[in-house]
Image (spheres, rainbow, N blue to C red):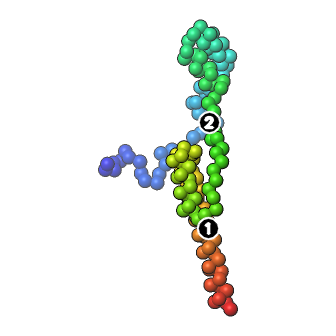
Amino acid sequence: MPRTSTTWKKGVSGNPRGRTKGSRDRRTLYREGLAKHVPELVRLLLAAARAGEVSAARALLEQALPRTKPRAEVVPVDLGEGRLTERVEQVLRHLAEGALNVEEAVSLIGSLATMTRIVEAEALEQRIAALERQVCA
C-alpha cells in the first residue's frame, strides 16, 4: 500500500502522550458496574437452573467448578542399562505392547534425546580439558 499523508509515519506514535492518567479501561468499568448486580444474577441463574434451563446450569457450574486439567498417570517403565538407541527401542517396544500411549512414548524419547545431548556435551568438555592439559604440559 503506498504511503499517503493520512497513513502513520514510521517510528511515530499515534498517541504520543499516551493514555491520560486516571483513565480506566472500559472492561474494568463494565465489571464494576455489574459487580453490584452479581448476587441477583446468581439467584436468577440458580432459579433458572432449578427449573431445568440447561444453559443456566452450565453457566453456574463452569464458574463454580472450573475445569481441571487432566493429570498424567505415572507409568513405571524399565528402559534397561544399554545404549541410548537400545533404550529408544525399548520405549517403542512398550508402545507396541500397549504399555505406553503415544504421548508418553514421545515424551520419553524426547527425554532420551535430551540425555544424548547432555552426554555429548560432557564428553566434549572432557576431550577439551584433556587437550588443554596436553597443550599446557
Chain-order first, disc 2 or disc 1: 2
Q: Which residue is mark 1?
A: 119
Residue 60: x %, y % from top left: 62, 20
Q: Secondary structure at mark 2?
A: loop
Disc 1 residue crowd, few under 14, some 14–19, many 20+, Cα 10 Å: few
What's the residue at 63%, 50% (across, down)?
A: 77
User: In the rendered view, would you say 11 is above or below 118?
Assistant: above
Q: Quadrant of residue 63?
A: top right
Where is residue 136? Give x, y as percent: 67, 90
Query: In front: 101, or 37?
Result: 101
Q: Position of residue 58 (x, y in %)?
A: 58, 20
Q: Which mark is residue 86?
A: none
Q: Identify residue type, mark 1.
A: Val
Closer to the camera in the image, 42 or 83: 83
Residue assigned mark 2: 69
Type of amino acid under label 2: Lys
Per the image, label 1 sits on a secondary structure element best described as helix
Instruction: Report if residue 129 is visible in the image.
Output: yes
Furthest-front residue in view? 97
**Looking at the image, residue 105 lies above or below residue 121:** above
Report the residue at 66% width, 48% height from top. Answer: 76
Q: Quadrant of the image for the C terminus?
A: bottom right
Q: Which residue: 47% across, 51% down?
A: 12
Which residue is depicted at the point 60% across and 70% down? 121
Q: Are marks 2 and 1 in contact (CB under 8 Å)?
A: no
Q: How many marks?
A: 2
